Amino acid sequence: MTVSSRRRLGAAELAEGVLGGQRPLIARAITLVESTNPTHHEQARELVRLLRPHSGDSVRVGITGVPGAGKSTFIDALGTRLIDQGHRVAVLAVDPSSSRTGGSILGDRTRMAQLAASDHAFVRPSPSGGQLGGVARATRESMIIVEAAGYDTVLVETVGVGQSEVTVAGMVDTFLLITLARAGDQLQGIKRGILELADVITVNKADGDHESEARVAARELRVAMKLISSDPHAPRPPVLTSSSFTGAGLDEVWQAVLSHRAMLQETGGLEAKRREQQLAWLGALVEEDVLGAVKRSPRVREIREHIRQRVASGEMSAIEGSELLVRAFVRDVPHLWPAYWADPTS
């Protein structure tokens, strides 16, 4: 099936195009699940339902790093290497969005020039939509789409060190932290929480004059990792060195990723981890859908500004205002979700 125009396609047509590996339709499918337009949500849900049985077999890796660590360059070099080995690589790079316009800074396609030009790679910068941590709600659905399209390796790049790492770690199999060697405090900029999330760590830009510094930093990080957990028998992430410029260490980093995933598979941890991720996703979607419905509620809109003014002036407490807004929303529920009102389990 070829598409000669931008006519609106149904979920079944989009699913057929995705399964056929048609890049324009893969992009349109992701655009659909990213849409915040309520009229698109039903079609997006149907699309995901059709594609989900064809997903789940890829290696899912989250990648984060300290500022300046060279995440995008690292992904470009690693992804190109994987393609040379016969893999198909999808990169979901979550970009920071403008709080005013909602636009995203789509720089990753230029920083990942080799991958973006490859027929065996799919690079998708996704605007965060201003969500906490810069992680797009649709990232999980986008993973399903690219997996169904036949990409066996999915790399999710985060915007940086922060809350987004917790979210990304909750949707991937292995979490890779990229850091740098620096004079003085090599651990500067790395929070303990990020180290606790990491399954594999690499000190990047280990080339030229910085190679020896990188090895020292890696050694110090290995010592630091012993202090993270009080359990001496707890598994610790391997700390490696790598260079996106020379390619040194990239194979070792990828082997560490595969070893971590193999360990999860052997112990049954991979299945359990993905099951827990699905349940966490369910909770997050419910919270977001309900919050969105509250904002769209006509009754809430009628009284919201009045309540805000009274709370701001001190005439009403925030607790009282919240109760009034929730009551207004509850009265609007049958109107907002008529299909679910009669039988919530249907």
Image (cartoon, helix red, strand yellow):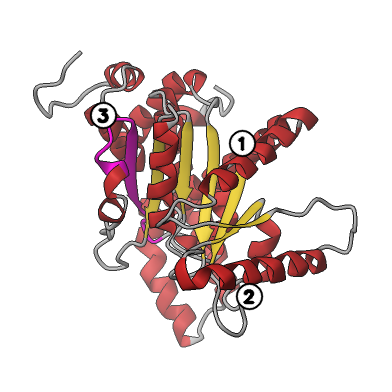
Foreground residue, 24 or 175? Answer: 175
Of helix, strand and loop, which one carries label 2? loop
Mark earlier in primary sequence (2, 1):
2
The image shows residue 126, relative to residue 189, as above or below, that is: above
Name the residue at 41% across, 23% down.
150
Mark earlier in primary sequence (2, 3):
3
Give the extent of the magenta segment.
Answer: 115-130
Q: Residues within 10 Å of mark 3 (few under 14, many from 20)?
A: some
Return the x and y of residue 117 as percentages of the image width and height. Answer: 24, 40
The image shows residue 185, relative to residue 32, as above or below, that is: below
Q: Amino acid at mark 1?
A: Gln
Return the x and y of residue 160 as percentages of the image width and height. Answer: 47, 64
Quarter of the figure with residue 267: top right
Q: Is residue 318 magenta?
A: no
Foreground residue, 337 or 154? Answer: 154
Q: CA distance from mark 3 to mark 1?
A: 27 Å
Q: Amino acid at mark 3?
A: Arg
Q: Amino acid at mark 2?
A: Leu
Mark earlier in primary sequence (3, 1):
3
The answer to whether mark 2 and mark 3 are in CB contact below 8 A is no
Quarter of the figure with residue 236: bottom right
Q: CA distance from mark 2 to mark 1?
A: 33 Å
273 lies left or right of 296: right
Quarter of the figure with residue 116: top left
Name the residue beneath numbered marker 2.
187
Q: Residues within 10 Å of mark 1 (few under 14, many from 20)?
A: some
Name the residue beneath numbered marker 1.
278
Q: Residues within 10 Å of mark 2 (few under 14, many from 20)?
A: some
Of helix, strand and loop, which one carries label 3? helix
Q: Quadrant of the N terminus?
A: top left
Foreground residue, 14 or 178? Answer: 178
Name the residue beneath numbered marker 3.
23
